[in-house]
Image: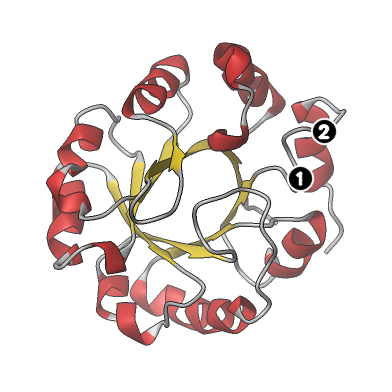
Amino acid sequence: MSFELMASMMCANYGNLEKEVRDLEKGGIDSFHIDIMDGRYVPNFAMSLNDMAYIASATKKPLDVHLMVEHPNHTVELFTDRLRKGDTIYIHPEAEYHPSTTLQKIINAGLTPGIAINPGTSVETVMEMLRIVKKVLVMTVNPGNAGQMFMPYVGEKITRLLALKEEMNFQIYWDGACSADRIATYAPKGIDGFVLGTTLLFGKKKPYGEILADIRKLKF
């Protein structure tokens, strides 16, 4: 069974970011997840434009950039200009008056368009955007901080999205409180990738390569 594993870089050790990127890449991570927070859309600040640009320069692996910012249409070019063809940018539909305009800018830049869906956002409110985007990032916790508790009712939303993904041609990614048990449960159902943070990947007393290998050996 194939699924992607993405490192949530807001959880990395910033005392030596170069080593973190190198060790994760050597350990077999599939992509790097970059959380950009403006302190307004979410009550936190995390990762800067320069952090993102550095990681993009330090690896050939894809980047998934998650914009947790108000009115991303005003600033999205700052990100598209520093990313590589094929990298992904997710926006939150609630953060923009006309999210389809912002998504079109991402598409025009040769990047992969995505939306992030908060726990309290219904599938119905983003239905038309599902016809535009290539990736849907399902937040299983409220956005803004690492180490939060999983919200069980999000499972019903994932079931609905899984029923739509082939018809509308998008992939589904899990973000938040991602444990081995949840990967073992939801990967067989069709989740395409998982963002790994402090629950499973960072701050452990094992090399990243061992952790990632153990995840890929999970029994389904």
Left or right, 98 with respect to 139, comes to left
Q: Position of residue 76 (x, y in %)?
A: 20, 43
State the separation of the CA atoms marked 1 and 2.
8 Å
Disc 1, disc 2: CB below 8 Å?
A: yes
The amino acid sitting under disc 1 is Leu
Q: Residue at x 61, y 68 (%)?
A: 190
Q: Quadrant of residue 169?
A: bottom left
Q: Position of residue 152 (x, y in %)?
A: 68, 77
15 and 109: which is toward the camera: 15
Query: Is residue 115 among what the camera can see?
Result: yes
The vertical placement of 45 against 93, above or below, is: above
Q: Amino acid at mark 2?
A: Lys
Q: Secondary structure at mark 2?
A: loop
- Badge 2: few (under 14), some or many (20 or more) residues near its Cα, within 10 Å? few
45 lies above or below 98: above
Q: Residues within 10 Å of mark 1 (few under 14, many from 20)?
A: some
Image quadrant in which you'd find residue 109: top left
Seen in the image, is 13 located left or right of residue 9? right
Which circle marks residue 104 in the picture?
Answer: none
At numbered mark 1, what does the secondary structure look like: helix, strand or loop?
loop
Residue 30 in view in this figure: no
Q: Nearer the viewer, residue 93 or 158?
A: 93
Q: How is the image coloured?
A: secondary structure
Quadrant showing the N terminus: bottom right
Residue holding disc 1: 200
Residue 96 placement (x, y as % from top left): 21, 63
- Return the residue at label 2: 204
